[in-house]
Amino acid sequence: MLDSLDFEALHRIGLAAPLLQQLASLAPDADTRLLRVVEVQREHLLLHDGHAEQRARSGPALLDALQAEDDGLAVGDWVLARPDGQGGWWIVERLAPLTQLARRVNDGRGSPRRQVLVSNVGTAVLVMGLDHDFNLRRLERYLALVRLAGVDAVLVLTKADTVDAATLARRSAQAREILPPATCLLALDGRAAATAQALSPWARAGQTLVLLGSSGAGKSTLTNTLTGLATQSTGDVRADDSRGRHTTTVRTLRCTAAGACVIDTPGLRALRLDVGGEGELDAVFGDVAHWAGQCRFRDCRHQAEPGCAVREAVAPERLRNFHKLQREARRDTMTALERREQVAVWKARGRNAAVRMRAKREG
Ligand SMILES: Nc1nc2c(ncn2[C@@H]2O[C@H](COP(=O)(O)OP(=O)(O)OP(=O)(O)O)[C@@H](O)[C@H]2O)c(=O)[nH]1
Ligand SMILES: [Mg+2]
Ligand SMILES: [Zn+2]
């Protein structure tokens, strides 16, 4: 199979050299093909071979193996597939992704499950409107998501054409303040043709970028501008609070005119980070980690301790957000038993509070 690869076509859909090395070690046989996942539907997936889309289903053995690892197929994955004899494809193998963006979701069955959002992206474009969508705490969460995955981020503030110069300058400066030093920030009109040019350093041939942000931020608008096509539907936002109407419902990979791959995503209703432990957040909140070294107490939690350098230096809203994400990380790394114990403690606390309240009323 390796000698029959159509590199030109595969490069069009973002094939990178490290994946080829993996392929060599898998030694696929003659009737398997290398394809990229461009859309995941409930019952089937769409794959692309650089020429056309193909319908596929995943073999149960592969699904089970991935699930056992809290993993799953996502848009951007490279897979090996075989013809299923009915014009479609069976996915038999997934190449280990170079990067994965994942969150935790609660499906009501025990501990939150890890859900892979996209695989094999080089850049995450964080899309946020300069209208009422503008929210620094949400931005911190998205920055953490991307940082934890080892993916580069670019912040794109959309709807620059709808705000006055003072608002544009103020909001850009506020965002700049919480961005890691090397992260670029662009403020633009997502519909303008010049926008494709502004994003071109991250959208060169062979590169893959994903657009992330809340509903109505302008992700599909940017996708259309980058591809030069109107394939992605866009929807109006509510006038009073700029909220979108969840127009996009699936993640889809599209090719741009310049030969890059762009993944449009639906606005996430909830983004719960997939953090391995509290310590991982230090990499994301570098300023907290930096100032923590100067707190009076070595185990300072930056809550109410005297001599806390972090509380002195870091904006209260940012520190509150840090604590909130840390609590989430702690809950997610608990075992099922620890979780039951914590619930029992909360229940007991609730009961005690109820008893105290009753005593107060009756006394
Ligand atoms: N004036 C202006 N309007 C924009 C800009 N970017 C997006 N819009 C408009 O904002 C609305 C929402 O844009 P979409 O691209 O559908 O937003 P989305 O992020 O894809 O939203 P979901 O698919 O719901 O997650 C549409 O009416 C767009 O025309 C911009 O830079 N300037
Ligand atoms: Mg959309
Ligand atoms: Zn402290």
Image: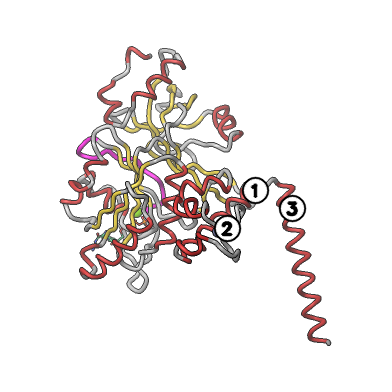
Name the image quarter holding the N terminus: top left
Direction from residue 183 to residue 69 in the image, left or right: right
Which numbered circle lies on residue 340? Answer: 3
- From the image, give the main secondary structure of the stretch colored magenta: loop
Q: Secondary structure at mark 1?
A: loop
**Relative to 66, residue 230 above or below:** below
How far from the left and from the top, in percent, is residue 287? 44, 53
Q: Secondary structure at mark 3?
A: helix
How far from the left and from the top, in percent, is residue 143? 41, 51
- Amino acid on which the number 1 mark rests in the picture: Ser
Which numbered circle lies on residue 111? Answer: 1
- The answer to whether the residue bearing label 2 lies less than 8 angstroms from the nearest atom of ligand 3 is yes
Residue in the picture at 38% in, 48% down: 265
Q: Quadrant of ligand 3?
A: bottom right
Direction from residue 301 to residue 49 in the image, left or right: left
Q: Secondary structure at mark 2?
A: loop
Q: Residues within 10 Å of mark 1 (few under 14, many from 20)?
A: some
Q: Residue furthest left?
A: 194
- The answer to whether the residue bearing label 3 lies less than 8 angstroms from the nearest atom of ligand 3 is no
Q: Residues within 10 Å of mark 3 (few under 14, many from 20)?
A: few
Direction from residue 50 to residue 314 in the image, left or right: right
How many angstroms separate mark 1 from mark 2 (CA)? Answer: 37 Å
